[in-house]
Amino acid sequence: MKVVVQRSKEAKVTVDERTVGEIRQGLVLLVGITHEDKLSDVKWMAEKIAGLRIFEDEEGKMNHSVKDIGGQLLSISQFTLYGDCRKGRRPNFMAAARPEQAEVLYDALNEALREQGLIVETGKFGAMMDVQLVNWGPVTLILESGA
């Protein structure tokens, strides 16, 4: 599982010009699932995201997690994170999980994050989405399970 984490002041996702998910300050998650991922990857990722200390304290040091600041999450499924561009000019998506497997694990990740006490908004799995965000910092990290 691969998740691009972006610290955000605000974000929203639209499908067919209709807002389907929107947050105030918190994290935008671009979530990629590979065919090797399991529920253990989901649990590890949810705990990592919930506890990741990337928000500043009073002294300007990254000491607070999204939970600490009462932030929210906007989770977007993103199979293209597993696009292999090493050969040719067209990405190969063979490492991405099939939609029926990926959706189950994506939903499980969002539920595991909610179990951590977080508010989680989502896009629409498999849809063409427009994502808008104000990347705060900017701070962008890539998390990988099993790495």
Image (cartoon, helix red, strand yellow):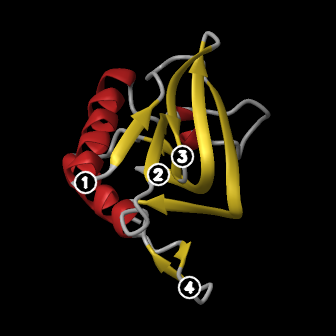
Q: Compared to 96, does 115 lie above or below?
A: below
Q: Residues within 10 Å of mark 2 (few under 14, many from 20)?
A: many
- Asked if marks 2 and 3 touch (Cβ < 8 Å), the reply is no
Pick whichever of labels 2 and 3 is earlier in the sequence. 2
Look at the numbered disc 1 and give the secondary structure of its residue: loop
Taking the image as shown, residue 95 lies to the left or right of residue 87, namely left
**On the rendered image, what quadrant is the C terminus found in?**
bottom left
Q: Disc 2 to disc 4, how far (Cα)?
A: 31 Å
**Residue position marked by numbered label 4 in the rendering:** 58
Q: Disc 1 to disc 3, how far (Cα)?
A: 16 Å
Which residue is found at the position 64% from the left and 12% from the top? 17
Judged from this view, the residue extending furthest toward the front is 58
Task: Identify the image quadrant of residue 102.
Answer: top left
Estimate the x, y position of residue 40 in percent, counting from the top left: 21, 54
Badge number at residue 2: 2
> Tag 1: residue type?
Gly
- Asked if marks 2 and 4 touch (Cβ < 8 Å), the reply is no
Estimate the x, y position of residue 24 in percent, counting from the top left: 54, 46
Depth order, front residue of 106/38: 106
